[in-house]
């Protein structure tokens, strides 16, 4: 059973471009969480999704950021018109429906905006 | 809102010795979970230990144990017989026990160096 897969591992974008980060949850997991880790900081929650639904987006910036988790395929975190301040590591975690199981993390995508 | 505070940005320990990492938190909830995660240079977040707030007994996982002081809202991690492979960032995290949302609230981390 493969773990949570994130790709790409590293992504370089110029200011103003779009960044698309992908997360394939573990098999059987229908819940996905996205976190952002700025340099020298802990992780900050961004959004919690279930298949085809956004459950909690209280940590998402109001502009330029969006997330989806379609019925088929990976979850996508999309950042439009990237700026230098978006440079960070973005982590995805997935969990099953079972309440007594914690989420498993992917290895993250490091986004660098130049 | 819940907060998690780690007051030690950096710690070091001699190989085979014991080290304790501190964490305090603030919450008005009675049902919650606390965690310690390890982040090595590979960046992979690895769950080290989990504590349910309703359990009085401190969680233990091999060389890792916690000192959970609920009234003081303190949750420290003790690493015994430290090994070189323990060198990493350690994050304390909190999540509510209510509902199905497993989002975590994180401290800023403690960088642990293990000296041979």
Image (tube, helix red, strand yellow):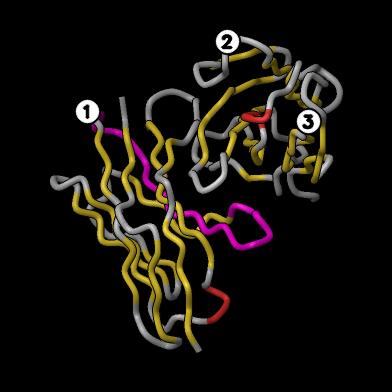
Disc 1: host chain: B
Q: What element carries label 3?
A: strand
- Identify the residue at horizontal 43%, vertical 52% (top origin): B109
Q: In this view, does B20 lie to the left or right of B116?
A: left
The disc at residue B85 is: none
Which structural element holds mark 1? Answer: loop
Residue that mark 2 sits on: A62
**Left or right, B12 with reference to A45:** left
**Residue at the image position 56 percent from the left and 45 percent from the top:** A39
Residue to which mark 3 is pinned: A21
Q: Classify mark 2: residues with Cα within 10 Å, few (<14), some (14-19) or many (20+).
A: few
Q: Position of residue A75 (x, y in %)?
A: 76, 26
Distance (Cα) linking label 3 and label 1: 35 Å
How many labels, in total?
A: 3
Instruction: Examine the rendered structure and indicate whether residue B109 appears above or below residue A82.
Output: below
Residue that badge 1 annotates: B28
Q: Which of B60 and A18 lies nearest the eye of the viewer?
A: A18
Quarter residue B17 falls in: bottom left
What span is in magenta?
Answer: B28-45
Q: In front: B106, or A75? A: B106
Q: Which chain carries label 2?
A: A
Q: Say if residue A91 shows up in the picture.
A: no
């Amino acid at each position: 059973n493969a773990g949570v897969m994130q790709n790409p591992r590293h992504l370089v974008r110029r200011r103003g471009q779009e960044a698309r980060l992908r997360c394939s949850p573990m098999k059987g997991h229908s819940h996905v969480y996205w976190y952002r880790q700025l340099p020298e900081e802990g992780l900050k929650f961004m959004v919690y999704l279930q298949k085809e639904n956004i459950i909690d987006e209280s940590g998402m910036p109001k502009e330029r950021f969006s997330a989806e988790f379609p019925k088929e395929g990976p979850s996508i975190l999309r950042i439009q018109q990237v700026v230098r301040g978006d440079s960070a590591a973005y982590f995805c975690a997935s969990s099953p429906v079972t309440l007594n199981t914690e989420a498993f993390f992917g290895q993250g995508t490091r986004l660098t905006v130049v | 809102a819940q907060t998690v505070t780690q007051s030690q940005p950096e710690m070091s320990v001699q190989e085979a010795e014991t080290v304790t990492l501190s964490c305090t938190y603030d919450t008005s909830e009675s049902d919650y979970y606390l965690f310690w995660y390890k982040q090595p240079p590979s960046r992979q977040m690895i769950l080290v230990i989990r504590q349910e707030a309703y359990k009085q007994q401190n969680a233990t996982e091999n060389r890792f144990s916690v000192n959970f002081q609920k009234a003081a809202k303190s949750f420290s991690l003790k690493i015994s017989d430290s090994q070189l492979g323990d060198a990493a960032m350690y994050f304390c995290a909190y999540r509510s026990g209510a509902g199905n949302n497993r989002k975590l609230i994180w401290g800023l981390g403690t960088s642990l160096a293990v000296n041979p």
